[in-house]
Image: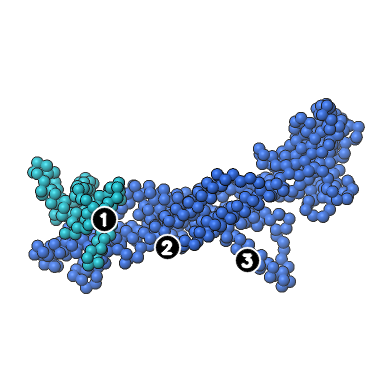
Amino acid sequence: MNRSDGSGALSSLADERQWVLDAVEDLDGVVLTGPVIFRRMHERLTDAEPGARPEAGPNPGDQSLLYPALHSLEADGRVEATWVSDANGLRHRTYRKRRLLPHRPGRTQRS
Amino acid sequence: MTIDWLPAFGFFGGGGALLITAVTLVRRCERRLGHRPDESGPPVTPGQTGADEISAYLDRMTTELRLPAADVAEVRAELVDHVHDSMASLEAEGFEPERAIREALGRLGPPAELGRQLRVAHQSTRRLLAGAGGGVIAAGGGFVLGYLGGIALGLLGFLAVFAVVALLAAAGVHLPNIIANDDGTTINSLLYATTLLVAAAVATRYAVRTSAGLSRRAPRTVAVFWAVAGALVFGWLAIFEMRGPQSWPGVALELCIPVVAIAAAFVRVERPMPHVGRWAIIVSAISLVVLSLGLVVSSGVSVSGSASGSATLPATSFEMSDLHLDTVAPMAPAAWLPEGIITGGGWGSDSTSGGTRVDDTVGADPAVPTAPSLKNWHEVRFEAWRALPMDEPGPGGIDTRYSAPLAIQPAVLSGNSLSAVFHFERLRDAGSWWVVLTAVGPDGHRYRIGDGGGGNSSFNGSAWDWLTAPQ
């Protein structure tokens, strides 16, 4: 069973979008791959004060809404995606929050 | 001739900017619609651990994705990268490789649902609006490009037909002259219709491909909208708005333009557009400037040369009876003619309606009021009769094969001149005409009270004007 099933799919996607935005919010020019963003979402909720934690957070065993959320945010112009190559020459799709002013050259965080 | 430079710069600059923007947009969208698979991230390597399972998952997901090729390739590559990353993490946690694959894929959810969600995410309202706007710009630029291409195609076709006819004539084959005595109207209307037809086709195809690329939809999905829009807009333009010389072949081509726009939106629309290189754009832009300036110059020359004429009789030696003016009506008895007899007149283009304005000056002496000089006459009118061809040898004059005038207009008195406006340009085959001033005399019979003058006119209007024009 994943979060996209059932009548709560829309609200789940909206929550996922917000968690993704929170995860990429305070990065200074660093671009993140999808798996890193998901881990960061989970860590932020785990590290938050108990009173500040939302009732439901991302389930580490369910990544079904991660890419729909990332791609819809990109389509809405909230985040921007770029393909970057690592030291081994492998290309990875990375994301960062879109800003009005240009970023400094970014660093990639994969793990 | 004077050139208004500001509108000229606006026209050429605007057309050029539209062309360059459209070609840039189309190129960008073509890259998205016709993506090569080696341009994204890591593919699934055969033989790699779990390659079959990953490929099967991605294939099921792709069936629901229905996005342009570039987006499909990017999504697949990103998910492969994600699955490999997840597998590495899971194996570090102690999972067996086979179980790690199943777990990594299971965490992404059912493939069909993931594909559907990703499609919805990509096809946002924002991108739909961008696709609509980009489609309009691409259509504008495509129209300019197609117009230039249509002119080139029409001229090439004309030269090809001309060469074939010349060769056949040299070989002794006699061909009927189907364009005799039409002042090039048939050829001009065919060139005009071909140009518009090519422009409509290119504009619609540009709009579909650009709109599909920007809105992340399959070209066939957005083609319905652009087919309807193209048929309506270009059909309206071709049938009602674009004015010029017309002939049956040209009008038939113009009536095909809505069908051509629909065909351009659907036929083989998934195939990539031909690549338009930098030099093609530069040559097109230069051609636009040269052709437009040529048209402006030639239209200025032709207007000044043909838009007016004199009512005086041909200068060649002839007898008055050669003009056959008595076919119209007998000349009025001298005693009844207005005081200060008709002194002459002329014809020219009517600036208000675009028709032909005919004037006869009555009364040479300004001291003698014109109205009393016409006291013996009523139902004063201008009659336009078909005339013998003006551009052939001979005195011209009334064509006696006709027993009725081509058109009649009441004469309107203004100052010391009588005038009327004829719309020969709205008659399909007006050709040569002769206009005579007639009136009913004191005995109740109609007489000619001037010898008038003649000229040539050809049809000028829209395809609809042509279809509804009187013979």
Q: Are marks 1 and 2 in contact (CB under 8 Å)?
A: no
Measure how far apart labels 3 and 1 are at the Cα level: 59 Å
Q: Which mark is residue B160?
A: 3
Q: Residues within 10 Å of mark 1 (few under 14, many from 20)?
A: few
Categorize mark 2 by other alpha carbons within 10 Å: few (<14), some (14-19), many (20+): few
Mark 1 to mark 2 CA distance (whole Å): 38 Å
From the viewer's perspective, is the residue at label 1 or at label 2 nearer? Answer: 1
Q: Amino acid at mark 1?
A: Pro
Residue B193 coordinates in the image, percent (x, y): 59, 54
Q: Secondary structure at mark 1?
A: loop
Q: Provide residue B147's location: percent of width, then percent of height.
A: 54, 55
Residue B271 badge: 2
Check the image and report above or below for B386 versus B164: above
Q: Quadrant of residue B256?
A: bottom right
Q: Are marks 1 and 2 on the same chain?
A: no
Q: Residue at x 69, y 70 (%)?
A: B168
Q: Position of residue B230 (x, y in %)?
A: 49, 51
Q: Secondary structure at mark 2?
A: loop
The colour of chain B is blue
Q: Secondary structure at mark 3?
A: helix
Q: Is residue B453 above or below residue B394?
A: above
Which residue is the site of mark 1? A105
Give me the chain letter of mark 2.
Answer: B
Subunit that carries the residue with mark 3:
B
Query: Dot 3 surroundings within 10 Å: few (below 14), some, or many (20 or more)?
Result: few
In the image: residue B314, left or right of residue B268: right
Q: Quadrant of residue B161?
A: bottom right
Going 61% across and 57% down the picture, which residue do you hit? B191
Q: Residue at x 57, y 45 (%)?
A: B5
